[in-house]
Amino acid sequence: MTDGALLKVSSLEEFFRDALHGAAEKQRLALDDHTEHYVVNVLTSFARADAFFEQTPTGPRLKPLATMLSDAVGARTLAERQHALQRLGDVSLFVAGFFAHGFARKLVDVDYHIAMGGRAYGSLADSARAAPRGRTIAGVFHELALKFRELVDALNEIADAARPPCHDDLMRLYEIWIKTGSQRAAGRLRELGLEPSASARVRWSH
């Protein structure tokens, strides 16, 4: 926790379910039960390093998102393509949600992960609709694509609850708002006494 104390939980899945539900309510983000369950499963799974990283001869590694996309494009079968896209979407969501502050002064920022993850889930939704009995999972992927940025905000809320405050937070929040239009970042800036300017985002987009 932010005060340095450890929080003991009996079930990691239950912890993430409660945390996501609370963060979504705070961000006024409505999620279908199936979508919420999917996200909780992703968080619970990726809490284990062996599920998040891929094993290579040189040790655990995380592929760049561009490589994951290349894997999906070059997949030999539909099943392989869907698996690669799902991995791309899941990793993008987890990284953007829990490590947004770690992108400061990096060439690849959180907006890149939001764009890549949202498109991956959108492609999965289109693919799943054509499959027999694929309507439910297609709906999940469609909602993930549609609300990807808002979901990242909710996960940022969970991550910040366990991260000690930093004096660089104000500038980083402003960068995140400029690049993504995050309503959570805008709200936090206002709480800290800074009013985001819409014209700044227009200039950035150009």
Image (cartoon, rainbow, N blue to C red):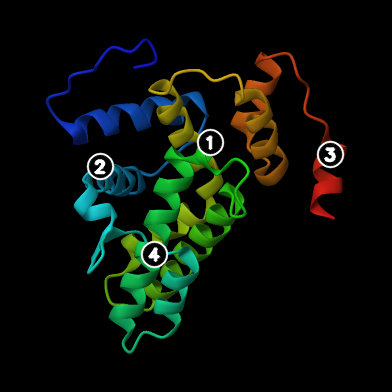
Q: Which residue is mark 4?
A: 63
Q: Amino acid at mark 3?
A: Ala
Amino acid type at mark 4: Lys
Please name whichever residue, 133 or 22, is drawn nearer the observer in this view of the structure: 22
To which quarter of the image does residue 3 belong? Answer: top left
Task: Say few, some or many: other residues with alpha carbon within 10 Å of mark 3 (under 14 / 14 to 19 / 20 or more).
Answer: few
> Picture coordinates of residue 69 (x, y %)?
46, 72
Amino acid type, mark 1: His
Q: Quadrant of the N terminus?
A: top left
Name the residue: 28% across, 77% down.
Answer: 132
Taking the image as shown, residue 42 lies to the left or right of residue 167, namely left
Measured in 3D between alpha carbons, the distance from the residue under mark 1 to the one under mark 4, in whole angstroms, is 20 Å
Figure check: 25 above or below 89: above
Q: Residue at x 39, y 55 (%)?
A: 91
**Contact (Cβ within 8 Å) of mark 4 with mark 3:** no
Of callouts 4 and 3, which one flags the residue occurring earlier in the amino acid sequence? 4
Badge 3 marks a residue whose secondary structure is helix
The residue indicated by pointer 2 is 47
Furthest residue in direction left, as rendered: 10
Residue marked by disc 3: 200
Q: Quadrant of residue 68?
A: bottom left
Q: Position of residue 143 (x, y in %)?
A: 46, 53
Q: Is residue 151 visible?
A: no
